[in-house]
Image (cartoon, rainbow, N blue to C red):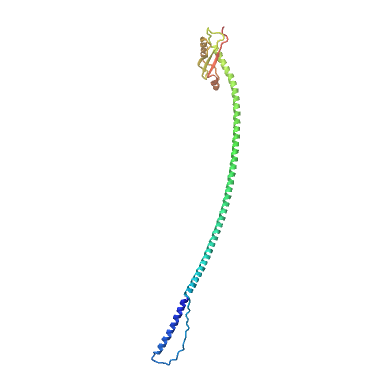
Amino acid sequence: MNLTGYSILSVFLAVAIHAVIVGLLLTNWQSEEHFPVTPAEKFYIDASVVKQNPHTVKKENTAKIKRQAQARRQKEKKAAQQRARLAQEALDKQAALDKQKAEEAQRKLAAIEQSRLEQLLEQQRREIAESEQQAADELAEADRARLEQEIALAVIEEQDYRRAVTDDEKAQAYVAQIQREMIQNWSRPPSARNGMQAIVRVRLVPTGEVVSVDVEESSGNDAFDRSVVQAVQKSGRFLVPADSRQFERNFRSFTVLFRPEDLRL
């Protein structure tokens, strides 16, 4: 309540008290029995009205309200600043914690990656070493196999050469026998002369039987050529090697030079 309200209340109270006193006096005066009235003591109420300038009061009230509002704003500002500071501290603390966790996780991840990298490098070194060893073993095996093959081929060639020499000697012996049989079965024609010769191709079967005979190189004398063919046919069968390989090589199909030595001039 402001000062103007207090002033009005004071005036109202003074008027009310005077009205009550006057009412009491009038009531006692009109009563049927009259009693000696002792003059009442006079009471005086000192009521004073304090007058203030409304503009001054309003200005003071406005200033007070402003001060209260300003104080309230200051208090709210401080509270807001306190809350902001606490919130920022919480954020900073959480950020530091998150950073610490992230750094720890990064260190663990780096350690894991380093360990994995070392394992991969070790595995690669082991695989390279195994590959090099395997390549060396394969190369050594290949060299050994090639050397063995060369030795085997050399042995085979040596054996083939020796066998060929032996087979050729045997073949020449069989050919000489065939030539002797042809000469024994040959009938000399009248036109045969010294120095005549003919080469015939003879084809046999493994049993030595004659299959065919043809003149490959003529003597120039038909009668002489026919006599040579007839000499082979008359033999009918020749002695040949029992070895099938040697037979196929030398006597399945072969040529014979026929040249009698005792022809006339």
Q: Position of residue 43 (x, y in %)?
A: 47, 86
Residue 91 vertical position relative to residue 205 in the rendered view, above or below? below
Q: Nearer the viewer, residue 167 or 234?
A: 167
Q: Position of residue 94 (x, y in %)?
A: 54, 58
Q: Residue at x 59, y 25 (%)?
A: 157
Tell whether 194 sits left or right of 23: right
Residue 252 vertical position relative to residue 130 in the rendered view, above or below? above
Q: Residue at x 58, y 50 (%)?
A: 110
Residue 49 vertical position relative to residue 244 in the rendered view, above or below? below
Q: Nearer the viewer, residue 100 or 15?
A: 15
The image quarter containing residue 181 is top right
Query: Is residue 110 something one can see in this rendering?
Result: yes
Q: Quadrant of the image for the C terminus?
A: top right
Q: Residue at x 58, y 19 (%)?
A: 168
Tell whether 168 sits left or right of 49: right
Q: Position of residue 4 (x, y in %)?
A: 46, 76
Q: Nearer the viewer, residue 105 or 15?
A: 15
Residue 111 vertical position relative to residue 72 in the rendered view, above or below? above
Q: Give the mark count.
A: 0
Q: Position of residue 204 (x, y in %)?
A: 52, 18
Query: Is residue 235 something one can see in this rendering?
Result: no
